Amino acid sequence: MLRSVRIVDGLKPDQLDAPTPCGNWTLRELLAHMIAQHNGFAAVAGGEIEDLSVWTNPPIGADPAAEYAAAAERVIAAFAAEGVLDSRFWLPEIRDGGLFPATMGISFHFVDYVVHGWDVAAALGMPSDFDEDLLLGALEVAKVVPTGAARLAPGAAFGPEVSLSDNPSTLDRLLGQLGRAADWQSRSA
């Protein structure tokens, strides 16, 4: 999470309309999604089980990096609260909604922020520099993400798996597992 904050800190407001490797989203759309997910996960860690508005993408203001950092701090604090790991998270966007063990919900959020951190870094033309242990942990979670036709549905969280070259790095394997090409280049490059 903190590495994603450092990556987003490199974002300038004039870059918000740049394309990203995350579907057809611009950096503005991706950042709004990332902030909404932090806010939603913070709310459900605090016990929210029915208000869909906690998952709403906010408008991005004049200081997107500060807005992102504040949302990241909210979710970090929510995940660290006493008793959270023994709770259940309401995740309306996963498998038509439902309650999931908090540890599972946190693992979903974790893999998203390694991959979305990479999305932002790739869009900005900078390295993501995640530690190998984080990448290995994210890869283990990514391996249980359903594949097949579900990845082709409109609004699917991840695209179809991407073929890998010989001897792929852990990052390449993670990205490929979740439908990203590690060699993605901006359409505007």
Image (cartoon, rainbow, N blue to C red):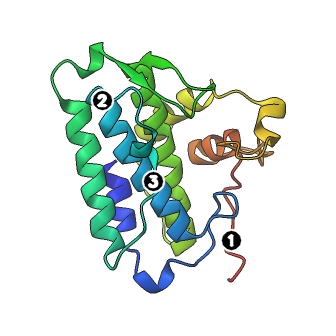
In this orientation, which residue lies closer to the viewer: 71 or 6? 71
User: Could you tell me residue 159's position as x and y percent?
Assistant: 74, 45
Q: Amino acid at mark 1?
A: Gln
2 or 1: tag closer to the N-terminus:
2
Numbered disc 2: secondary structure: helix
Callout in the foreground (2, 1): 2
Distance in Å between CA atoms under marks 2 and 3: 16 Å
Where residue 156 sits, quadrant-wise, is top right
Measured as percent of width and height from the top left, residue 181 is found at 71, 55
For mark 2, what is the residue?
A: 45
Depth check: 91 or 175 in front?
91
On the question of residue 48 being in view, the answer is: yes
- Find residue 41 and name its label: none
Of callouts 1 and 3, the N-terminal one: 3
SS assignment at label 3: helix
Q: Amino acid at mark 2?
A: Ala
Occupied quadrant, residue 145: top right
Q: Is residue 164 left or right of residue 26?
A: right
